[in-house]
Image (cartoon, helix red, strand yellow):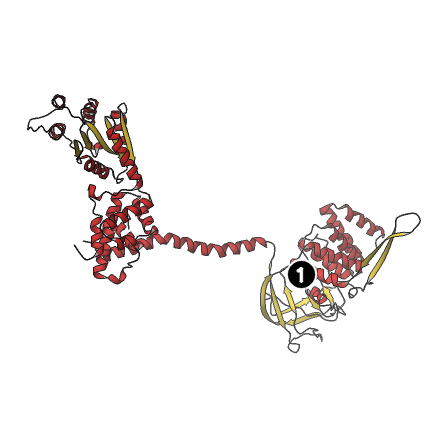
């Protein structure tokens, strides 16, 4: 006699047992997909270190700054980097000791970026390019690791006061004593030099001197801003090198220096970047630093171009 | 007869070797006709072989039923293992020689020499792999005398192939192989059987998917199919009596087929 109810129970057990491997496979697949995606994302960005963006709520009255510093912007996005902090500052006396009360930091997001700070890039992007009395302090102790040992310039402008931000790991009150020896005074950075709209270049092809070709070259600061905008997105060393060259050509040696520094950080094997880096230093009256930087670079790369430039700088041919 | 249609259908698949229940399928029909033609030829031995459940016994039964009225034909569905008993049975059935005395191979040859038929008597031996090799050798010698024509059925295994090689390879004989049913043949087989018993509604409940599952479970073995369907309709019969709401009268459910397979041991649950 058939026991159908018992058969039904057996059938249910059989179905569960039969479908269990498929269920497990599906579960494994569902687990494997996010793990794989996570792994692949990490493998794509092996060098990038995580940065935390903070939005600073500035409260001028509560800041216990010994000087009468006033912040120009109410809100600034500052990049906290493990290797470098580039801070937009007001002028500060190099001898002064500044005590800054810990600002209230609000975590906005966590995205991987590369140092140094692109705060100045953002300002220029908005066509502000107003450096006025601002200057960039590049801390010698936090310069790129991949730079030559001697190529760690500390550039600063004599400023009246500066506001320093603290990372979360720091104490609530930090006294920063800026050694005067480690600072080199530079001229304030001017805005991007205004170029003529067009430049006509005539070329002659025969002895009679008649012009056969006329090259009309257009100069437009918008192009540079576009490139800077693209560079912000993809962090291509080729773009930063281009920007470096353009700034140098425009005579904005401070920016040329900054972008050369960024380029070297992204890729420390670009000869042109190091050349412009050194040339910018010379132009910024940092001849000795330029010489030491070039020497270090030549030691590493044996660059002939760098050797020629070093020779020119030493002999005073390049000023 | 019960009013439950599933009970009637169940009886159809009761596994018995009965030529009345023989279902003529295309491929089987071709083999059967070839077998009948072979019998007309002056062959000493004919071999019908195939895997278990391919319908060898049924075909032998059908052959016996078809030839019974036209010539002397004897069917031994169950092997007679004892040699004396075998020859005594053969003498009784072929020559109508009744005796209680022992009949050995020599005595049987003497007896067969005294009889002469217009049409050589045909002896059908089912499950021939169960006969002892020595008896098989004597059967071969009898067939050599052309006094009796033998038709064997053998399971197709390595061992039986060996028997065939050892005993029959030098003899004039013809062999026919039977195969397991294809899904299409199985569907036709099931539906023909059901329709023969007026189970048209039940026959229509089988679709391609159902039959494919049955074919997968039984590997086209007719005997296993009969067993499975017998159990299947037993389950349907129970549902019809106790939980009729669970029955879908338009389709045979996979669940019920699998339950029947668990019951018959085709699925190890």
From the viewer's perspective, is A230 left or right of B72? right
Residue A242 visible in the shown view: yes
In which quarter of the view is residue A192 placed? Answer: bottom right
Residue B202, given in percent of the width and then of the height, sits at 26, 54
Residue visible at 71% across and 62% down?
A226
Give the chain of mark 1. A
Q: Nearer the viewer, residue A37 or B71?
A: B71
Q: Nearer the viewer, residue A68 or A189?
A: A189
Q: Quadrant of the C terminus of chain A?
A: bottom right
Element assignment for label 1: helix
Residue lying at the far right of the rendered structure: A208
Q: Nearer the viewer, residue B267 or B221?
A: B221
**Disc 1 packing (10 Å; few <14; some 14–19; many ≥20):** some
Residue lying at the far left of the rendered structure: B100
Residue lying at the far bottom of the rendered structure: A61
Residue B14, given in percent of the width and then of the height, sits at 20, 47
Above or below residue B149? Residue A43 is below
Residue B141, given in percent of the width and then of the height, sits at 20, 23
Residue B210, given in percent of the width and then of the height, sits at 32, 51
Can you identify the residue that label 1 sits on?
A232
């Amino acid at each position: 006699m058939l026991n159908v109810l018992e058969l039904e129970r057996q059938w249910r057990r059989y179905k569960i047992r039969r479908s269990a491997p498929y269920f497990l496979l599906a579960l494994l697949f569902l687990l494997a997909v996010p793990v794989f995606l996570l792994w692949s994302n990490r493998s794509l960005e092996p060098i990038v270190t995580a940065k935390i963006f903070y939005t600073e709520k500035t409260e001028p009255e509560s800041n216990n700054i010994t000087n009468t510093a006033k912040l120009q912007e109410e809100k600034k996005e500052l990049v906290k980097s493990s290797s470098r902090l580039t801070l937009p500052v007001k002028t500060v006396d190099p001898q002064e000791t500044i005590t800054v009360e810990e600002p209230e930091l609000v975590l906005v997001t966590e995205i991987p970026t590369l140092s140094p700070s692109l705060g100045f890039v953002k300002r220029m992007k908005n066509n502000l390019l107003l450096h006025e009395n601002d200057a960039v302090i590049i801390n010698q102790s936090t310069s790129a690791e991949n730079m030559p040992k001697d190529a760690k310039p500390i550039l600063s402008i004599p400023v009246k006061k500066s506001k320093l931000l603290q990372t979360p790991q720091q104490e609530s009150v930090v006294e920063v004593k800026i050694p005067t020896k480690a600072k080199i005074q530079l001229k304030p950075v001017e805005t991007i030099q205004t170029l003529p709209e067009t430049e006509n270049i005539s070329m002659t092809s025969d002895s009679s001197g008649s012009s056969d070709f006329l090259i009309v070259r257009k100069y437009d600061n918008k192009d540079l801003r576009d490139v800077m905008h693209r560079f912000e997105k993809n962090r291509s060393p080729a773009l930063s090198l281009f920007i470096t060259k353009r700034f140098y050509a425009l005579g904005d040696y401070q920016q040329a220096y900054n972008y050369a520094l960024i380029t070297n950080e992204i890729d420390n094997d670009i000869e042109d970047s190091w050349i412009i880096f050194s040339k910018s230093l010379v132009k910024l009256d940092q001849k000795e630093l330029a010489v030491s930087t070039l020497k270090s670079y030549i030691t590493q790369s044996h660059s002939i171009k760098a050797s020629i430039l070093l020779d020119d700088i030493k002999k005073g041919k390049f000023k | 007869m019960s009013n439950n249609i599933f009970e009637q259908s169940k009886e159809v698949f009761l596994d018995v070797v009965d030529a009345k229940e023989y279902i003529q399928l295309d491929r089987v029909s071709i083999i059967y006709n070839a077998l009948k033609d072979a019998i007309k030829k002056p062959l000493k031995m004919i071999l019908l072989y195939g895997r278990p459940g391919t319908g060898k016994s049924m075909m032998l039964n059908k052959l016996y039923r078809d030839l019974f009225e036209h010539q002397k034909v004897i069917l031994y569905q169950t092997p007679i293992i004892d040699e004396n008993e075998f020859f005594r049975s053969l003498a009784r059935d072929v020559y109508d020689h009744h005796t209680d005395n022992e009949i050995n191979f020599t005595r049987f040859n003497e007896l067969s020499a005294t009889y002469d038929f217009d049409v050589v008597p045909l002896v059908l031996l089912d499950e021939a792999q169960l006969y002892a090799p020595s008896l098989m050798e004597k059967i071969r010698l009898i067939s050599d005398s052309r006094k009796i024509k033998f038709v064997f059925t053998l399971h197709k295994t390595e061992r039986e192939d060996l028997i065939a090689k050892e005993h029959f390879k030098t003899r004039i004989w013809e062999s026919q192989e039977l195969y397991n049913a294809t899904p299409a043949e199985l569907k036709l087989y099931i539906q023909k059987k059901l329709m023969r018993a007026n189970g048209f509604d039940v026959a229509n409940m089988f679709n391609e998917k159902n039959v494919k599952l049955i074919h997968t479970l039984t590997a086209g073995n007719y005997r296993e199919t009969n067993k499975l369907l017998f159990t299947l309709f037993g389950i349907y019969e129970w549902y019809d009596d106790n939980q009729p709401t669970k029955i879908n009268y338009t389709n045979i459910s996979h669940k019920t087929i699998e339950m029947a397979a668990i019951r018959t041991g085709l699925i190890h649950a």
